Image (cartoon, coloured by chain):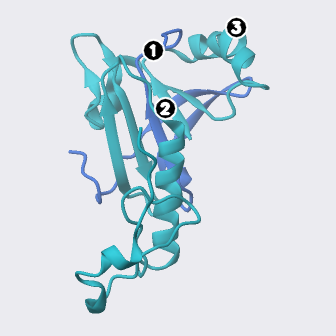
Amino acid sequence: MIKAGKPAPNFVAPAYYQGRFTHVELSRYREQWVVLYFYGGDYTFV
Amino acid sequence: MLSLSVDSVYVHKVWNESELSKMVPGGVPFPMLSDPGGTIGREYNVYNEDMAVDLRGTFIIDPDGVIQGYEVLTSVVGRSTDEIIRRIHAFQIVRESKEKEFTPADWKPGMTVLKPAVELVGRVWEMWKPVRPRE
């Protein structure tokens, strides 16, 4: 259950980053501000 | 900044190369994450079962891993990156002040911050007079 003021659920996900395929784990971004930016799909319009 | 959709990393690669790099010099500068089946989207309550996609959810997470704010839009209206950046600036100022300073409504970087204290109760109007042009 997501709530403001509560810890963000950790996850590991495959990622594309600057020409390479990699994996990203949210917890490795401790000590930094993070924006998670969900969207509907690649090649959509908005 | 981490973006997420249900698309595969292969589609992310081709989208970046074929389209996004024509809008953003050098291409997308942050990791584009793949969320097949909306596993992460479900955890964050932004997955739309009917359309099998993640909705436009934006989550601001602080250096302790705590969600400081989020918003979710349906698929028809895009977000304001200026507003996301404004919110992060505001959260950073509050955090740096160890929550001694708060940012009022419509605050922008460079404007007055408020220091909550007994004396301020009922007197915010003296401190905070944002002038907004009529539209």
Q: Are marks 2 and 1 on the same chain?
A: yes
Q: Which residue is mark 1?
A: A41
Quarter holding the N terminus of chain B?
A: top right
Q: Are marks 3 and 2 on the same chain?
A: no
Q: Nearer the viewer, residue A25 or A6?
A: A6
- Residue lying at the far front of the rendered structure: B134
Closer to viewer: mark 2 or mark 1: 1
Q: Is residue B15 left or right of residue A46?
A: right
As drawn, the chain in cyan is B
Q: CA distance from mark 1 to mark 3?
A: 15 Å
Who's the residue at 31% across and 34% down the image?
B72
Q: Which residue is mark 3?
A: B18
Disc 2 residue type (three-letter): Ala
Closer to viewer: mark 3 or mark 2: 3
Q: Nearer the viewer, residue B71 or B49?
A: B71
Relative to B54, residue A42 above or below: above
Q: Are marks 1 and 3 on the same chain?
A: no
Residue B98 visible in the displayed image: yes
As drawn, the chain in blue is A
Q: Nearer the viewer, residue B38 or B72?
A: B72
